[in-house]
């Protein structure tokens, strides 16, 4: 069993918790990868975590683009000065 197995298990646990709690505020923690490559027995789990992270990133990028479009549309809405009437009475 590789000597860095426990360290990689800890890292994968941390990544999975972060993905599971994506809608919650998490305390950012500095990331220091364990020494050496991911042990072979954790490769499948690490690849699954990576795939989930990539899906999350893609979703965030889509959301960010949507928000940017909405902000751009709001910036195009003209604003009126306070002393300009808001309505025009065409009947009276």
Image: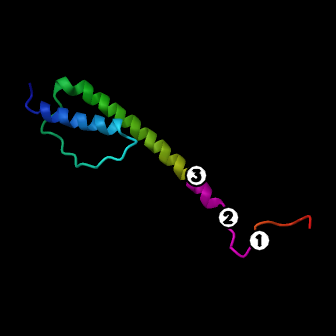
Q: Are marks 1 and 2 in contact (CB under 8 Å)?
A: no
Give the magenta range: 70-84
Question: In the drawing, does residue 5 fall left or right of residue 69?
Answer: left
| First in sequence: mark 3 vs mark 1 | 3
Question: In the drawing, does residue 35 fall left or right of residue 55?
Answer: left
Q: Residue 32's spot in the image, x, y percent?
A: 18, 45
| First in sequence: mark 1 vs mark 2 | 2
Tell me the quadrant of the picture where the C terminus can be found.
bottom right
Q: Residue at x 14, y 36 (%)?
A: 7
Residue that numbered label 3 is attached to:
70
Cα distance, mark 3 to mark 1? Answer: 27 Å
- Give the residue at the far bottom of this rendering: 83
Q: Residue at x 29, y 34 (%)?
A: 16
Q: Residue at x 16, y 28 (%)?
A: 39
Where is residue 4, by image quadrant? top left
**Neighbourhood count class around disc 1 (C-alpha, 10 Å): few under 14, some 14–19, many 20 upward:** few
Residue that numbered label 2 is attached to:
78
Residue that numbered label 1 is attached to:
85
Q: Residue 46's spot in the image, x, y percent?
A: 26, 30
Q: Which secondary structure, mark 3?
A: helix
**Neighbourhood count class around disc 3 (C-alpha, 10 Å): few under 14, some 14–19, many 20 upward:** few
- In the rendered image, the vertical position of residue 77 relative to residue 22, given as above or below: below
Cα distance, mark 1 to mark 2? Answer: 14 Å
Question: In the drawing, does residue 69 fall left or right of residue 84?
Answer: left
Q: Are marks 3 and 1 in contact (CB under 8 Å)?
A: no
Tell me the quadrant of the picture where the N terminus can be found.
top left
| First in sequence: mark 3 vs mark 2 | 3
Q: Which secondary structure, mark 1?
A: loop
Q: Residue at x 31, y 39 (%)?
A: 18
Cα distance, mark 3 to mark 2? Answer: 15 Å
């Amino acid at each position: 069993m590789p000597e860095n197995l426990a360290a990689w298990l800890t890292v994968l646990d941390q990544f999975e918790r972060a993905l599971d709690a994506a809608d919650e505020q998490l305390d950012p923690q500095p990331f220091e990868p364990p020494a050496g490559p991911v042990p072979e027995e954790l490769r499948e789990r690490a690849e699954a975590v990576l795939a989930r992270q990539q899906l999350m990133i893609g979703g965030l990028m889509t959301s960010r683009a949507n928000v940017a479009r909405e902000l751009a549309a709001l910036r195009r809405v003209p604003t009126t000065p306070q002393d300009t009437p808001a309505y025009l009475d065409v009947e009276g």
